[in-house]
């Protein structure tokens, strides 16, 4: 039974890595770990880049020497050719602004990136992306079917539910209007200049949607960077981190017990927000800007450093006393993951408790590992019904948090098809 042993190990590893409280993330943690690039608004744009290693000599007036990747014979998708910096030794490249105004139903998109990445982007996304055929989406409108924006007393503009929503219902789905090379390689004034071009070249409605987004530092000299900093999510383009600005989901405020959760898919170039639990009409829609499973002090520091605000959501108001329950979650997950240990006291009761904590803490966007562990636990004591119930929830939870193409969904679907054929079947009855 080599195969089942492998599967067993594999899933054990996944479950161990499911510990969402682990602080140091390794590359292998991507399956169940709350992946940072998905979870976080990045906010790490080097607004205070004075200590960043910048190369003053190598930026120059935009427009002086337009690079001509457009002059390669093939028709370029980019407006008027790109506007480029000079060669930046650290990047071994220049950075250029590329704009296409017809992307996503005439909403447009600007990239500030290297010619090489732009080229890959073009072949990967621009020509083939379904966003081209999509009608102008709700993005440029303030109102949509499912949400509207209005001032939220202490938090600036917020997004609110226009109707009752169920778990997994879509709220926004957007492509970026700006993708900007994330690493700090240019001095601030230069970077600002190029971002101005990037936004200025977009269709006016799109440019204005960008300019009206929230700022953190309120310095008009660096407005474009300020907005990018306060509103960006992160997307990997050609394997390189870029800041992605999407006006609609940028209106969603933070909560450490968010009623919604987002998934970024850098292949489809989409950012989708869905309800993590039922949301009532006129309730504010929230997402977590920081890992909600981290201890209070870490969440508070990240939000302060990256977004310039003190977290005052209900879980933050409990301060460090709220961390006790996170410790209990870790303990339960550890215990439930100890398949190989004959003295393990793990039980379906523990699995149910772990799920209940997620419900009580408002962490339903992050409950999938608990459902998956419950499915394994029920299966291991020979309850096919319990296993099926929870593996369904496990699949639905993974789809919600990681997307329908998440790597290990096929394994769970297999378990759903045949709980008795799964390695965990009756495992704890065999002693
Ligand atoms: C945008 O890209 C599409 C697809 O490559 C192209 O057909 C279109 O002409 C481009 N539009 C502009 C304004 O750059
Ligand atoms: C939510 O789910 C209930 C029951 O499944 C259904 O009746 C209702 O129409 C759904 N609401 C929305 C907004 O989809
Ligand atoms: C991302 O989008 C691509 C293209 O639509 C799709 O094939 C893939 O499954 C998606 N990834 C995830 C994790 O959902």
Image (spheres, rainbow, N blue to C red):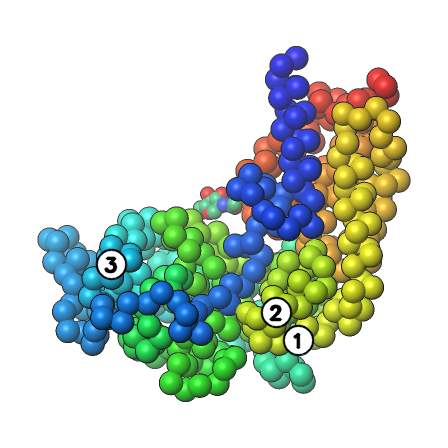
Q: In which quadrant of the rendered view does residue 137 lie? A: bottom left
Q: Are marks 1 and 2 in contact (CB under 8 Å)?
A: yes
The C terminus lies in quadrant: top right
Q: Which residue is mark 3?
A: 89
Q: Which residue is mark 2?
A: 303
Would you call the spot at circle 1 few (<14 residues within 10 Å), some (14-19), or many (20 or more)?
A: some
For disc 1, the marked residue is: 310
Real-space Cα distance between discs 2 and 3? Answer: 33 Å
Q: Which mark is residue 26?
A: none
> Could you say which is closer to the camera, residue 280 or residue 318?
318
Q: Are marks 1 and 3 in contact (CB under 8 Å)?
A: no
Q: Neighbour class for label 2 at 10 Å: few (<14), some, many (≥20)?
A: some
Q: Residue furthest top?
A: 1
Image position of 65 (left or right of 5): left
User: What residue lies at 22% left-to-right and 70% top-to-bottom?
Assistant: 57
Q: Earlier in the sequence, mark 1 or mark 2?
A: 2
* Quarter of the N terminus within the rendering: top right
Which label sits in the foreground, 1 or 3? 3
| For residue 292, side relative to residue 45 (left or right) | right
Residue 92 appears in view: yes
Position of residue 396 relative to residue 211, above or below, is: above
Q: Earlier in the sequence, mark 1 or mark 3?
A: 3
Label 3 beta carbon less than 8 Å to ligand 1 = no
């Amino acid at each position: 039974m080599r195969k089942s042993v492998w599967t067993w190990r594999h899933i054990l590893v996944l479950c161990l890595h499911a510990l969402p409280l682990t602080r140091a993330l390794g590359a292998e943690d991507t399956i169940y770990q709350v992946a940072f690039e998905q979870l976080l608004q990045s906010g790490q744009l080097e607004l205070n880049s004075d200590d960043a290693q910048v190369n003053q000599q190598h930026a120059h007036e935009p427009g002086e020497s337009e690079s001509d990747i457009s002059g390669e014979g093939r028709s370029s998708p980019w407006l008027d050719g790109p506007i480029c910096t000079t060669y930046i030794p650290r990047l071994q490249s220049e950075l250029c602004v590329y704009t296409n105004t017809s992307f996503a139903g005439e909403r447009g998109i600007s990239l500030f990136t290297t010619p090489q990445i732009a080229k890959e982007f073009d072949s990967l996304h621009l020509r083939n992306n379904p966003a081209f055929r999509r009608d102008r989406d709700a993005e440029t409108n303030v109102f949509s079917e499912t949400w509207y924006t209005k001032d939220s007393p202490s938090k600036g503009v917020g997004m609110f539910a226009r109707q009752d929503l169920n778990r997994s219902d879509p709220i926004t789905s957007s492509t970026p209007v700006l993708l900007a090379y994330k690493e700090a390689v240019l001095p601030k004034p230069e970077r600002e200049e190029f971002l101005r071009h990037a936004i200025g070249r977009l269709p006016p409605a799109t440019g204005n949607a960008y300019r009206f987004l929230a700022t953190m530092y309120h310095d008009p000299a660096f407005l474009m960077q300020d907005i990018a900093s306060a509103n960006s999510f992160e997307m990997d383009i050609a394997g390189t981190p870029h800041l992605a600005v999407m006006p609609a989901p940028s209106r969603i405020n933070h909560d450490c017990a968010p009623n919604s959760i987002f998934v970024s898919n850098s292949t489809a170039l989409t950012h989708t927000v869905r309800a993590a639990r039922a949301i009532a009409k006129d309730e504010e829609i929230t997402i977590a800007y920081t890992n909600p499973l981290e201890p209070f002090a870490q969440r508070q520091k990240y939000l302060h450093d990256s977004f310039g605000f003190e977290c005052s959501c209900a879980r933050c108001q409990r301060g460090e006393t709220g961390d006790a329950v996170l410790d209990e979650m870790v303990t339960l997950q550890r215990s439930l993951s100890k398949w190989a240990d004959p003295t393990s006291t793990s039980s379906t009761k523990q699995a149910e408790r772990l799920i209940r904590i997620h419900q009580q803490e408002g962490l339903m966007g992050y409950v999938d590992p608990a459902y998956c562990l419950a499915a394994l636990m029920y299966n291991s004591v020979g309850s096919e019904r319990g296993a099926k119930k929870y593996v369904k929830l496990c699949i639905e939870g993974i789809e919600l948090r990681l997307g329908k193409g998440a790597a290990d969904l096929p394994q769970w679907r297999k378990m759903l098809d045949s709980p008795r054929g799964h390695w965990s079947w009756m495992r704890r009855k065999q002693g």
